[in-house]
Image (cartoon, grey):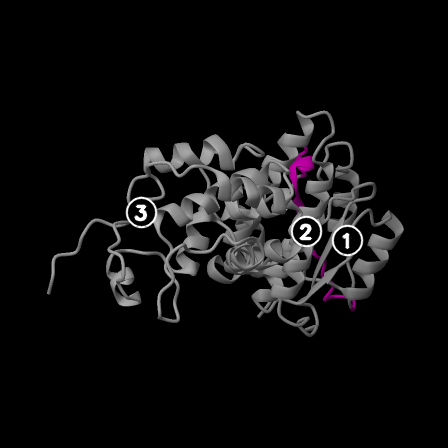
Amino acid sequence: MGTRRAHGEQRSGESGDGDQQEGGLTTGEVARRLGVAPTTVRTWDRRYGLGPDAHTGGRHRRWTTADVAKLERMCALTATGLPPAEAARLARSEEPTTAAPFPRAAGSPRASTRRRSRAESGLQLGDVRQECRGVARAALRLDAAALDELLLAAIAEHGLVAAWTEVIVPTLQAVGRKWETSGEKYVEVEHFLSWHVSGALRRATPPTVADRPGATVVLACVPGENHTLPLEVLSAALAERGVPVRMFGGALPVESLVAAVRRTGPAAVGLWAQSRTTASRPLAQHVAAMEWGVRGARRGPVVLTLGPGWAGQTVAGLTRPSGLAEAVAALESAVPS
């Protein structure tokens, strides 16, 4: 067996097997390196001519250092809002620069500096999972297909709770910071990202779990509260664990909330408040005091106050989970098996 040469060096006329030995990246590896969907890489190749310069006879194409550099440039340009066709033209025309052999470790200083300097010129993500960068780029490009694929892939790989906590939330927070500091720009990106997160949660959630008497969880935003996305992921995570959930969404009026609790007789109720102005201690206490059933065997719900709006508003006897994982565990334990 011959000695392997440094990654990125190529000898003219070598076959696909030689490319693989020399460390050329597959399309999937390139996509993970860039933080985009594999279909996005293939589309850029087919539509804009950003494919590998060297073609092999094998089925699996291999990408060199120079090939990947063009795609990194494409990512950086589209993340600034440049139309893909124009970004591709600039990426193709840019003079190649000397780059270190790939694959460089994701956490190495040189690789991290390169990503922050250009690819994150739209959003400052900091030290996050690589998937966040791909989701952020797709959101900034308003690329619906890539965004859906990346979100579903993150949920499938990490599970709903970890995908929400470690991929989706950091990206949503970065988008929020961006529009807050840019004079109301990028609002469309936040709405676009939130909509696709909601859709991904629905697609990744198993069919609605059938009711079990006394084992249902009711989830609702308090009156005046319309931020439903965190409650949607909680609903999806519970359904993933086989817990029956009745989700009532945003700004449920007091009378409707009371009626829903009485009609379902839930084991637990989760009340979401994003803002302190919407969190209502008397409402939470009222729901916790509700009872139903025959005399001598009456029961009431376990009530959880969910969301940052409840900070500083401790309600005696009620649980306030600090995060999604804790909320899932508390609600799951409140439901009889």
The quarter of the picture where the C terminus appears is: bottom right
Crowding at mark 3 (Cα within 10 Å: few <14, some 14-19, many 20+):
some
Residue type at mark 3 is Phe
Instruction: Please state the extent of the stretch shown in magenta in the rendering.
Output: 294-315
Res 231 label: 2
Q: N-terminal of the two: label 2 or label 3?
A: 3
Q: Was residue 304 drawn as part of the magenta stretch in this picture?
A: yes
Q: Which mark is residue 249?
A: 1
Q: Which of marks 1 and 2 is nearer the N terminus?
A: 2
Looking at the image, residue 164 sits to the left or right of residue 113; the answer is right
Name the side, left or right, on which 158 lies relative to 316: left
Residue at point 64%, 51% (across, down)? 143
Q: What residue type is labelled 1?
A: Gly
Percent position of residue 186, x then y:
70, 35
- At horizontal 43% and vertical 60% (from top left) the residue drawn is 28
Vertical placement of residue 113 versus 141, above or below: above
Circle 3 SS class = loop
Question: Alpha carbon of mark 1 to alpha carbon of mark 2: how far?
Answer: 8 Å
- Residue 283: name its quadrant: top right
Q: Determine if the magenta segment contains residue 22.
A: no
